[in-house]
Image (cartoon, rainbow, N blue to C red):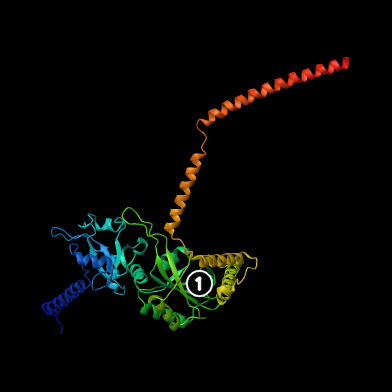
Amino acid sequence: NKQSAPPVDKFLKPAAGIAIAMLAYYFMQGMKNEIPRIDVKDELALREVFFGEGALGKDYAVLCHPEAKDGSVGLPVSSVFQDSHDDGSAPAEFVLMDCDYVLPDSGKSIFEKFKINKKKRPTVFVSGKVGPPKQVPEKHLKTGAMLTKLLKQMLEPHAAKIEKTKELKEKCLNKDVCGLLLKGGKPEPYVKHAVANLLGKYPNVQFASIDSTVLFLTNLEEYLPEYESGQHRFVVFKKVSGGLAAGDNETKAEGRLKTSILPLESDGVSFGAINTLVSDALNGKTMKKIPSLPNVKTRTRKLEESERQKRDRKKDQARKKSKDDSTPPQQTFSANDGSKEGRKLERDRRRAEHNKENNVKPKTPEELAEIEKRRRQRMEEESAKWNIEGEDEEEGGSTEEGWMDSGDEEEGDSDSNDDDEEDDEDVLDLD
């Protein structure tokens, strides 16, 4: 009754089928996860990857990876880059590129052209619609998850967080258009929802936020509604000229950065109010140029008081200007009241009457220049007539000497006369 083991032949076919199926699965999976390579000789493909100029308009995560030569296998792809690619959640197209390729237009390699440090491995940069190539720092290349997280931060639309003046300039003021939310406290859900909708509606507008409860924007607060705890404010910046690029041997400096503002005048923020404000800025509504760029400071009572004084001065100036504009110019100084303006008005009136009575026409600038020229000529001619510096100096010298001599003689004569008078007096005394 002892049963014998089944023959091995019965297991060979199923085992072979399982092995073939597994090989096919891994083969298909490898084909699915294979990262495409950019043909560096295709100029249009390069411009699409570097600058997003093609019809696709995508963002790219590029791994600098040398192309295999002479049929060799070549270097393996970085596991960090491969894992991030396989994750599939990063908003970028993953491609490989031979960055040692020398571009024919510039004679420089891709490394040299875009100043990419090839010593930092793996060498990854981001480019495309987001802008020209920008290298990913090494601290974000330790795992595929870290790279994916960075790509989401760089490429997905989000409001930038502002805490320093440098961040304000780089992330907001240097953009063509930037909307800044000045938070007066913790944002309510409807505020977050409004900003999220604006990010989707205006992909070409940079949005940012700053915590006004602890930070203060000098050179800006006086143009906005006064700060109140719990009240959010909003302002749109539009770059006028200049930039932050200092320039080098290849590029020219952009000049001093100048910007203009369009503040939200109403209290509180909402999607409708911000949407209208951003739309007005994009459609060419007149914006106010500010003389100095805003700076981020820690909010203090001293800064708040300084801002309040500026606000009061602006109100006083506005009231004075409105009052002056309401008074007709001809009634401001109707008669000579002894003031400077009154005397000037009287002189202008008399001059106008004289010109009208004598039919005097105002002289053109050319006629005034000709009169001045003739006046200078007459002065030179008169000066030449009275110029006695030549031989007159010699005559003057001899005259002076003669005067000195005659003076001595006169003095000598007077002395002799005095002596005679004294002798006469002596004679008289004797008598």
- The total of numbered circles placed on residues is 1
Q: Is mark 1 on a helix, strand or loop?
A: strand
Residue with the mark numbered 1: 211
Q: Residues within 10 Å of mark 1 (few under 14, many from 20)?
A: some
Residue 381: % across, % down? 47, 43
**Residue drawn at (51%, 30%), measured in percent from left and top?**
391
Observer-nearest of 333 and 112: 333
Is residue 218 visible from the viewing direction of this image? no
Q: Specify whether 254 is left or right of 41.
A: right
Residue 294: % across, % down? 49, 66
**Residue drawn at (53%, 78%), measured in percent from left and top?**
231
Observer-nearest of 159 and 255: 255
In the image, residue 251 above or below residue 307: above
Q: Quadrant of the C terminus?
A: top right
Residue 28: % across, % down? 18, 74
Residue 51: % across, % down? 27, 66
Q: In which quarter of the image is the N terminus?
A: bottom left
In the image, residue 214 above or below residue 245: below
Residue lying at the far right of the rendered structure? 431
Residue 368 occupies quadrant: bottom left
**Residue drawn at (46%, 54%), measured in percent from left and top?**
371
Residue lying at the far bottom of the rendered structure? 1
Is residue 158 visible from the viewing direction of this image? yes
Amino acid type of the residue that numbered disc 1 sits on in the rendered structure:
Asp
Observer-nearest of 244 and 76: 244
In the image, residue 387 above or below residue 2: above
Q: Specify whether 261 is left or right of 425.
A: left
Residue 115 occupies quadrant: bottom left
**Residue drawn at (63%, 65%), measured in percent from left and top?**
339
